[in-house]
Image (spheres, rainbow, N blue to C red):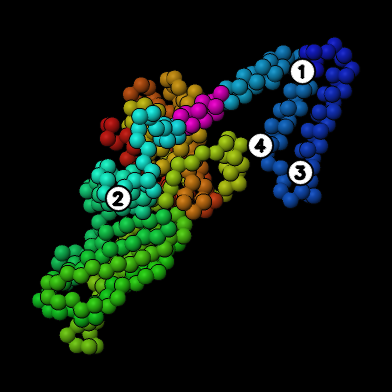
Amino acid sequence: MRHAQISKDTARTNALRGEAMLIMISIIRVGQSQFVKAPIDEDSVDRIMSGVRSLSEFTQHKQIETVYLDDTRKAFRAMVQAEEKKRAAKEAVEKAKTAIHVDDVVQIRQLSKKNAGSGVDEIDVDLERATGGGESAAEDLSSKLSRVVQLTGFSDPVYAETYVTVHQFDIVLDVLLVNQTSDTLQNLSVEFATLGDLKVVERPTTQNLGPHGFHNVQCTIKVSSTDTGVIFGNVVYDGAHSTDTNVVILNDVHVDIMDYIQPASCTETQFRTMWTEFEWENKVNINSKAKTLRDFLEQLMAATNMNCLTPEASLKGDCQFLSANLYARSVFGEDALANLSIEQDGEQGPITGFVRIRSRSQGLALSLGSLKGINKIGVAAA
C-alpha cells in the first residue's frame, strides 16, 4: 500500500502485492499442516485472511488504505505515548522516595560519636523496618482482631481460638487453649490437618492443663500455591481413665488467597499469549448497584488485588459500556488474568455483565471468582 502511494509503477506494486499474499497464505498452510507441533489458531487465521483481503481490495476501497497507513500509525503513537507517560510517572515516584533536600543532615554512622544525642538514627529505623520490628506497633487493632478465629464454642470443655499470622510462604497459628472444667486435662494436644496445597511442618507438643488454666501453642503450616486451602483439626486429651480419650472438634480455618495475590503489569502481547495458553476459566456474572462503571472497576481491583492493563485514555469519558483487562501475580509466580465486560442501564441503573478469570491452575481461577468482595461490590452504594 505504501509503495502504491509513493510510486506509479503498477507492475511493481502488483508484484509486491502478490508476493505478500503468497507469504501470508503459505503461513496459514504451514500452520494447518501436520508437520507443526502446535496448529495455528482460528484468530490468527482470520487476522491473516483479513490482511489478504485488504491487499486485494485496497485499490477499490480507499478507506482500507487509510486504516492501515494512517489510523494504525496513530494508534501505535498513542500506545507509545501512554507507555512513556506511565514510565515517567513511575520514575517520578521512585525519585521522590530517594530525594534528599540540600539542607538535610547526612548521618555517617562510622563518624558519629557514641554519646552524641542526635535523636533518632535513620539507619536503625531502616534496620528495624527491614526486620519487621516496627510492623507490630503500626498494625491497626481492628486488623489484628480480624485475624482471630474462634475454633470451639464457649460451652465446650476446652475453649480454643487462634491468631492467624500470614508470612510469604507459611502460616503461623498461635492457639490459645482454656480449660473450662474443674479437672486437670492430661496429655492435651492440638492436632491439625490440611486440605489443599498446605503442609503442617511443626506440630504442637502434648501438655497437661490445670483447672481453668490457659496455655498457648503454635503450629506452622507451609503454603506452596494459591489454591484454596482449609485447615481443620481437633483437641485431644485423656479422661478419668487411661483408656478414655476425649476429642473436641475444631472449626475450619480457611486460607485467604488475597494474602498471596499482588498487582502486576505485562504488555498486551504477553496478556494475549497467556490468555490463549491458559486452560482454566471461571466466568462470574455481575449484577451490581454501583454508581458508575468506573467505580465498579476500581472496587473490583481493590477486591481482587489486580492491576488494570487498559490505558487510562481508553477509560476516559462517559459511556454505558466498559471493557478492561486486569492482571495479577501470586508470590509463587502464578499468573491470573481477568477480562471485564459490563454495561449500565441508564445513568442510575444497575450494572450487569460478566468477568472472565483465567489462570494456569484451576484452583486460582475458582478462588478469585468466588471471592466475597466481588459479590459485595455496589451493595454499600445502594
Q: Considering depth in this image, is 147 or 46 the residue closer to the camera?
A: 147
- How dense is the environment of label 4, judged by Cα within 10 Å: few (below 14), some, or many (20 and up)? few
Q: For the residues marked 3 and 2, what is the alpha-carbon distance in whole angstroms?
A: 77 Å
What percent of the width, then of the height, locates residue 53? 75, 25
- How dense is the environment of label 1, judged by Cα within 10 Å: few (below 14), some, or many (20 and up)? few
Q: Which residue does the numbered mark 1 point to in the structure image?
A: 2
Q: For the residues marked 1 and 3, what is the alpha-carbon distance in whole angstroms?
A: 30 Å
Say which of marks 4 and 2 sits in front: 2
Using residue 125 as the reference point, say whether residue 2 is left or right of it.
Answer: right
CB-based contact (under 8 Å), mark 1 and mark 2: no
Q: Which residue does the numbered mark 2 point to in the structure image?
A: 114
CB-based contact (under 8 Å), mark 1 and mark 3: no
The residue located at (87%, 23%) in the rendering is 15
The residue located at (79%, 42%) in the rendering is 30
Q: Does 40 appear above or below 176?
A: above
Q: Quick one: label 1 or label 3, which is nearer the N terminus?
A: 1
- As for residue 63 lying within the magenta part, the answer is no
Q: Amino acid at mark 1?
A: Arg
Which secondary structure lies at badge 4?
Answer: helix
Q: Which residue does the numbered mark 4 point to in the structure image?
A: 43
Residue 32: assigned label: 3
Q: For the residues marked 4 and 1, what is the alpha-carbon distance in whole angstroms?
A: 26 Å
Q: Quick one: label 4 or label 2, which is nearer the N terminus?
A: 4
The quadrant where residue 242 appears: bottom left
In the image, the segment drawn in magenta is 81-92
Q: Amino acid at mark 2?
A: Lys
Q: Is residue 52 visible?
A: yes
